Amino acid sequence: MELTNVSKQIIKNLSVDCVVFGFENFELEVLLIKRKLNPGKDSWALPGGFILKSETLDDAAVRLLEETSNVKNIYLEQVHTFSKTDRFPLRRVISVAYLALVNPEKHSLKPGIDATDVKWQKVKDPIDFPFDHQEIFDRALNQLRKRVRTKPIGFELLPEKFSLTQLQNLYESILGEEVDKRNYRKRILSLKMLVPLNEYQKGVSHRAARLYKFDSKAFKKLKDEGFNFQL
Amino acid sequence: MELTNVSKQIIKNLSVDCVVFGFENFELEVLLIKRKLNPGKDSWALPGGFILKSETLDDAAVRLLEETSNVKNIYLEQVHTFSKTDRFPLRRVISVAYLALVNPEKHSLKPGIDATDVKWQKVKDPIDFPFDHQEIFDRALNQLRKRVRTKPIGFELLPEKFSLTQLQNLYESILGEEVDKRNYRKRILSLKMLVPLNEYQKGVSHRAARLYKFDSKAFKKLKDEGFNFQL
DNA sequence: TCAAAAGTGTTTGCAATACACCCATGC
DNA sequence: GCATGGGTGTATTGCAAACACTTTTGA
């Protein structure tokens, strides 16, 4: 395909930046890339890029994530559009921020064409963002915290089969606060979105936890009935 | 100022569309303009326009509202960015939607340069929007419904001094459902965001209602203390 | 005196919270 | 047998919801 083809023309004053969250080792993480070029060469930044004339913003976010991390079929949601006139040093670029959720175990990382490296970074560790990426990150994390209380997201961050403790750890690390085990289980099970499996953890030196999976049909039904939950 | 001045250069692939809500005669209304030019000439559409290189999106929304309606110092909030490739017929334009709240009594309307007319239209009456303005409107109304339950907005839609019944009517017309008078008063007063005045309605042929005003200091204090409310 | 809206408390049920011990497993 | 996390129930509290009559005012 030629570069002059309209479908490949880029819109150079509009970019997409993705805040990709993952969960590993009981910790919430964010995906960062090491920038290949100036401005901000060698700094760890949010993955992003420009959009094409032929694609929507959602398309662009999906494409950019595939480029940076092989990531496909993930939870994706628009967060906010950032427009300070000096947010990008070289010229006026307005950026649309996306929030994405990825299970790190399912997706190997590879740097895209504009990066020399990619990594998962713990959210609670300090990050020295370039540009206005701190602001973008803060807003995305905030939105994630709201979402996790009102929508059954978070399952995207876990393996298909998971224990209730894993799920609780995920909630706690997103919200940054601890919750009561019994009360959490009561609530989450009362929503009937989880199916208990006849499978248990293996190779642990303590009682093995029962595994569950998310029942998206049951959830869809609840939603269609106008059900609203609050975790 | 010359048109060649950088501060007046427009970014022609990025627009702002405003969904401006007002409240009059116990009804939620939306501000519409009659388009002067094609595409969509003579149709009633959401007010909007292109942004300048020198301004943020928020700036642009404020400017565009002043141009269409003399409106100043109003509640303004970004909603979502719309990017279907064919959403605007002439060329690729991505649009950032804003939600604004205005007290119609405080602001006389005047058509801006791109409109032949402006009006307030009842939200519950059918509107035949051009382009993707229906989608934009739906999303903004949805966001307003969420906001009104978790933030003390809505006061911008009322006169400075208002009765509890007025406030309740506003809530009901935003949410599109009725609420219990006693319960509503209990909740709203328990938040201590309202100051009762020693003033009463005048010229009504029934018992005069007490007037209240919003206490933004008290609210700020509550917020700083991490208080979260849900109406 | 009538019409029209303002104003006012109590009861009930549900949902959130707080809280502590026994169970299964691998080493 | 011990260390480690898994798993479970009840009592209390606070909040939301339902609900009807009296008061004030102007016409």
Image (cartoon, coloured by chain):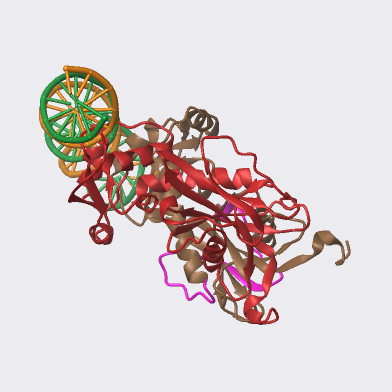
Chain colours: A brown, B red, C orange, D green
Q: Nearer the viewer, residue A144 or A206?
A: A144
Q: Is residue A205 visible?
A: no
Q: Could you tell me how many numbered marks the image carries?
A: 0
Residue at the location (35% across, 36% down)?
Answer: A187
Residue B198, image x and y in percent?
Answer: 16, 50
**Placement of A165 over or under A127, stated as above or below:** above
- Say whether residue A120 is magenta: yes
Residue A47, image x and y in percent?
Answer: 61, 66
Magenta segment: A104-132
**Placement of B2 over or under A218, stated as above or below:** below
Residue A99, image x and y in percent?
Answer: 54, 56
Q: Predominant secondary structure in magenta?
A: loop
Residue at the location (64% across, 57% down)?
Answer: B95
Q: Nearer the viewer, residue B15 or B109?
A: B109
Residue at the location (54% across, 45% down)?
Answer: B139
Tell me the quadrant of the picture where the N terminus of chain A can be found: bottom right
Left or right relative to A178: residue A92: right
Left or right relative to D18: residue A131: right
Left or right relative to B156: residue A112: right
Tell me the quadrant of the picture where the C terminus of chain A can be found: top left
Residue A82, image x and y in percent?
Answer: 55, 66
**Placement of B198 over or under A212, stated as above or below:** below
**Placement of B132 over or under C15, stated as above or below:** below
- Say whether residue A116 is magenta: yes
Q: Is residue A79 visible?
A: yes
